[in-house]
Amino acid sequence: MMVKIRLRRTGAKRQPSYRVVISDSRKARDGRFIETIGFYNPTTEPTTVNIHEDRALYWLSVGAQPTDVVKKLLNNAGTMDKLSRLKQGEALESLLAEATDNEVKAQQNHEEVPSSNTETVEEEVNEEAEVVADEESEAA
């Protein structure tokens, strides 16, 4: 039994979204699968990709073969680089901890930018409200 990591199509007509699944290569594209390890939505702007890296590394380490599209998605996520480091003898826990640290840093950077923008917008709105209130009180 050859195990593949591939995309399983979901979604409505002309609005595809995909699940990244582990399945037997002899099964149909949308047929029976072993495990779901993520999803891919090409219709959003930017495209949404979420793959559980620990499960992907596990299946790749035991011999699962990714399809071409999934291989590109894994390359973009950096999982294939981590697989080569895993094969060279690096510990799986250290690779996963590195991935978690990178995700936390990305979330912190993502949260810091909007929070500073919202504070300045709120200050501007408050200043405008004060100016309007002063003008109304002077007119009265």
Image (cartoon, helix red, strand yellow):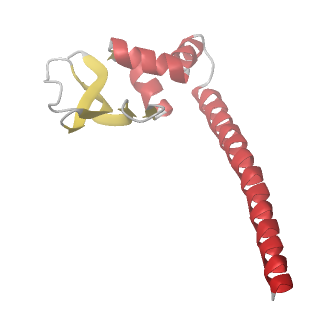
Q: In this picture, is 75 found above or below 34?
A: above
Does the image show residue 134?
yes
Does the image show residue 63?
no
**Which residue is drawn at the image coordinates 79% and 81% (left, top)?**
136
Q: In this picture, is 129 found above or below 93?
A: below
The image position of residue 111, as x and y in percent, is 69, 48
Pick the residue in front: 95 or 127: 127
Q: Quadrant of the C terminus?
A: bottom right
Q: How many marks?
A: 0
The image position of residue 130, as x and y in percent, is 82, 74
Q: Quadrant of the N terminus?
A: top left
Q: In this picture, is 32 found above or below 83?
A: below
Pick the residue in front: 137 or 48: 137
**Which residue is drawn at the image coordinates 72% and 56% (left, top)?**
118
Q: Quadrant of residue 94?
A: top right
Pick the residue in front: 33 or 44: 44
The image position of residue 72, as x and y in percent, is 43, 15
Q: Quadrant of residue 60?
A: top left
Q: Residue furthest front?
A: 139
Q: Quadrant of residue 21?
A: top left
Q: Is residue 93 left or right of residue 42?
A: right
Q: Is residue 139 left or right of residue 23?
A: right
**Which residue is drawn at the image coordinates 57% and 27% (left, top)?**
92
